[in-house]
Image (cartoon, grey):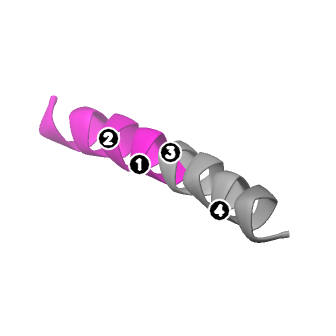
Amino acid sequence: REDFAGSAQDRRRAMVARSVRDLLEDGYS
């Protein structure tokens, strides 16, 4: 289903964004 695929994509995007933010914070710290 489109809505399910969209939810999964948003969830993965959010997880990736959090991982990237953590990496950036570790790099700048």
Residue with the mark numbered 3: 16
Q: Which mark is residue 9?
A: 2
Q: At x 36% / y 44%, what residue is drawn? A: 7
Q: Is residue 2 magenta?
A: yes
Q: Alpha carbon of mark 2 to alpha carbon of mark 4: how far?
A: 22 Å
Residue with the mark numbered 1: 13
Amino acid carrying mark 2 in the image: Gln
Of marks 2 and 4, which one's residue comes earlier in the chain?
2
Of marks 3 and 4, which one's residue comes earlier in the chain?
3
Q: At x 79% / y 57%, what residue is drawn? A: 26
Badge 2 marks a residue whose secondary structure is helix
Looking at the image, residue 26 sits to the left or right of residue 16; the answer is: right
Residue with the mark numbered 4: 24
Amino acid carrying mark 3 in the image: Val
Check the image and report above or below for 17 versus 19: below
Check the image and report above or below for 28 versus 8: below
Q: At x 44% / y 39%, what residue is drawn? A: 12
> Badge 2, how many Cα within 10 Å: few under 14, some, many 20+?
few
x and y percentages locating residue 5 in the rendered image: 24, 33
Q: Name the residue furthest front.
A: 28
Looking at the image, residue 28 sits to the left or right of residue 16; the answer is: right
Q: Name the residue furthest right.
A: 29
Q: Nearer the viewer, residue 1 or 12?
A: 12
Badge 3 marks a residue whose secondary structure is helix
Q: Which image quarter holds the N terminus?
A: top left
x and y percentages locating residue 2 in the rendered image: 13, 38
The answer to whether marks 3 and 1 mark residues whose Cβ atoms lie closer than 8 Å is yes
Q: Alpha carbon of mark 4 to alpha carbon of mark 1: how far?
A: 16 Å
Looking at the image, residue 8 sits to the left or right of residue 1; the answer is: right
Please identify, in this view, whether the residue under mark 3 or under mark 4 is nearer the observer: 4
